[in-house]
Image (cartoon, rainbow, N blue to C red):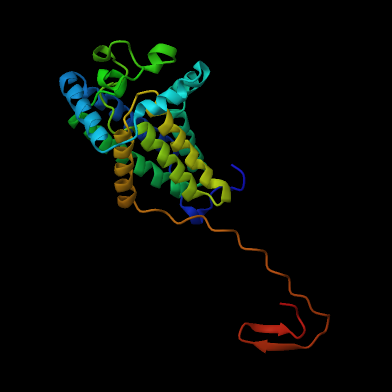
Amino acid sequence: MPGTRPASRAEGGRPPLLRELLLVTGLFLVYKFGRLLANGHETAAFRNADLVWDAERALHFPGEGAVQQLLLHGEPLIRAANTYYAAVHFPATIAFLAWLYWRRPAHYVWSRRVLALLTGAALALHILVPLAPPRMLAATGLVDTARVYGPSVYGAVPEADSMANQFAAMPSLHFGWALMVAIGLIAATRSPLRWWWLLHPALTLLVIVGTANHYWTDALAAAVLLGFALLVVPTPERPSEPSPPSEPTTAAPGAPRQRTDAGVVPIGARR
């Protein structure tokens, strides 16, 4: 990333790489298999989906269908949205953590803790409140774009999907992780262009809603949980701007000197 440099000792020591790889992999596996505990609750998932859909309409949320219609204007556009949903989520988060690990170790540890706390809270909510996504709910009238246009990351039969729990729509970790990536990079960098990282969660929100994988409420729940995690985990200091080099002191050879509080300084020396 332009305008950055390797971390210094003052910014915090870099944790051992092997330990971090094992830790992050372990956390991911706990989450992945923990989500499967929420499988088999189809009736509750659809009942909760009806409640969320009706609540959004009662609160006059914008319709998810309006976003989907924007994406359905062209097949290449909806395929791109499906690909973004399927292919960007994990690689972007891994790249984010890897870059922080190398360049900003203190911010890496902070981000890893925030993501772990967010993901743990999300896992608990997935188990306690199973929720069918809008693509499964007939009342929404939405298209399962991944199934119709591809690519899809989910199995054809949700109940038998051994790779993912399709009844864990709330909160949306696609959005929660994307928002943390943006916040983490904004906090860890100095570039005036760093605010452009907010395009990642904005685009992710457009994609998860437009592909009918999540309700607006799923993204809102993820943002609230992330907010709590950010309040709990102390934020490291922002990287400071490098100090400008001091102007060298010059004086003519043999010039008389005077004593000051800072010591002996040649008279006529430039400051």
Looking at the rendering, which quadrant does residue 65 occupy? Answer: top left
Image coordinates of residue 43 in percent, x first then y, are 16, 20
Nearer to the camera, 226 or 78: 78
Residue 103 visible from this viewpoint = no
Visible residue check, residue 136: yes
Image quarter where the C terminus lies is bottom right
When the figure is inspected, residue 102 is found, relative to residue 171, above or below; the finding is: below
In this view, the residue in front, 213 or 156, is 213
Query: Residue 5: x percent and y percent?
Result: 59, 48
Q: Is residue 205 above or below residue 198?
A: above
Measured as percent of width and height from the top left, residue 201 is found at 44, 37
Residue at (45% x, 45% y) in the render:
184
Quarter of the rendering containing residue 176: top left
The residue drawn where x is 51% and y is 54% is 9
Where does residue 32 sit, x and y in percent of width and height?
30, 26
261 sits to left or right of 63: right
At a point 20% along the width and 22% down the height, the residue shown is 46
Q: Is residue 183 left or right of residue 59?
A: right
Quick one: which residue is furthest to the right in this view? 253
* Residue closest to the eye, 264 or 76: 76
